[in-house]
Amino acid sequence: MVTTLNRQNSIRLDAVPTKEQMRLAIAQTLSLPSIYNSPVIILDFEVGDDGKITGRFKDADRPRVFSFEILDDIRFSPFKSGRLDNEEEWEDFSLGYSFRFDTPGGAKKKPQCVKPTSYNCGKSCINIKKNCRCNPDDAQSKDRIDKLKSLAKDFKKGQEGGGKQKESKVSESKDKKLSYSNFESDFEDLYFEEKRKQELKGVVAIKRRQMLDIAEGKYNVPREQLEDYFEKLKDNKKIFSVIEKGEELLSWVGGQTPKKQGKQPKAKSSKTKDLVAGQKAIKEKQISYAKFEKDFKEFYNEEKRKQELQGVVAIKRNKLLDDYAKKNGISRQQLDNHFESLKTNGKIFSVKEKGEELFQWN
């Protein structure tokens, strides 16, 4: 997947960049011929107080994951949890981070370094046990790196300043007075109201686009402002989201704030009464996060050992949580909340592949 800038995805310079814009800019930089020299996918990243950008990226065409850092120069090396003994171990490990991209038009570019014991470092190939260090001096690379560093500074300032976005020029007919705190409070209410409606239908799939359409109908503010506030909700870990079949699906982290708890819809039929009773019943047994973390890690390691005996390890979130819920008699919603806390606390790392969320313990 070749990453390019165009009119639709160009990064605005009059606003604090979002995480998606930063991922795009980092991918464009690392993909340059003078650096990795092949399309990449950014898995995660952080910007330090000194402006250093660190994170992990994956080769877009091969099961290879790298860790990187960008400051005065650019450095990257094969990423693997533990010691890297050979290329088979590295690529097997990297398979857990694989994504599928159905990109229209043309065949994929053949990797530059075809030997399994080497990888791209600029226009050279180096051994997988060595680190790549790049300090490009061509005009295109220097310009791209300078722009990325500038974006990183703005991104960091935005985080330190609570993510306040600089407002762009918008139509005078739009009201700009909606504060983030009011948006967060109201969006939470809108989310749980929509969730309750979908629960009564038996299927819950809350879409980002749908919720922002509802919010846009409620407030006379620019859509761009709502998008910025939504990104801040994710930055502040109020919500988490996954992409499924081209739609971004949302889930609020934790339950609804008690003071905002609205009245449950009145049951209008025996079927609805049974559903409400069932929802109350699953709250009978509780498990603390600390106990869940300890028990679930043992549960995970047991499943991992079973799969290792079969030769392939691919641990799926839904299956393992379902098995754990059945064994312990705990509601899936409670387990999902604890699972998201594991991700937030850096205990596990997960990726989406072919509609399944695969994960591993860090």
Image (tube, helix red, strand yellow):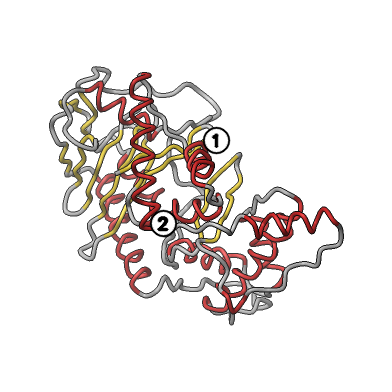
Q: Secondary structure at mark 2?
A: helix
The amino acid on which the numbered mark 2 sits, given as a three-letter code, is: Ser
Q: Is residue 289 left or right of residue 260?
A: left
> In the image as oriented, which residue stretches furthest toward the right?
269
Residue 88, position as x, y percentages in the image = 25, 21
Give neighbour class at mark 2: few <14, some 14-19, many 20+ (Cα, 10 Å). Answer: some
Vertical comparison of 63 with 317: above or below: above
The amino acid on which the numbered mark 1 sits, given as a three-letter code, is: Gly
Q: Nearer the viewer, residue 105 or 236?
A: 236
Among the 4 quarters of the image, the one containing residue 221: bottom right
Residue 300, position as x, y percentages in the image = 37, 38
Q: Which residue is mark 1?
A: 355
Among the 4 quarters of the image, the one containing residue 14: bottom left
Q: Is residue 132 left or right of residue 7?
A: left
Q: Residue at x 65, y 50 (%)?
A: 205
Give neighbour class at mark 1: few <14, some 14-19, many 20+ (Cα, 10 Å). Answer: few
Vertical comparison of 67 with 302: above or below: below
Q: Which residue is mark 2?
A: 341
Q: Nearer the viewer, residue 72 or 220?
A: 220
Between marks 1 and 2, how big is the CA–CA gap?
Answer: 21 Å
The quadrant of the picture occupied by the N terminus is top left
Q: Residue at x 34, y 66 (%)?
A: 154
Q: Earlier in the sequence, mark 1 or mark 2?
A: 2
Vertical comparison of 312 with 27: above or below: above
Q: Residue at x 57, y 58 (%)?
A: 284
Q: Secondary structure at mark 1?
A: loop
Residue 59, position as x, y percentages in the image = 34, 32
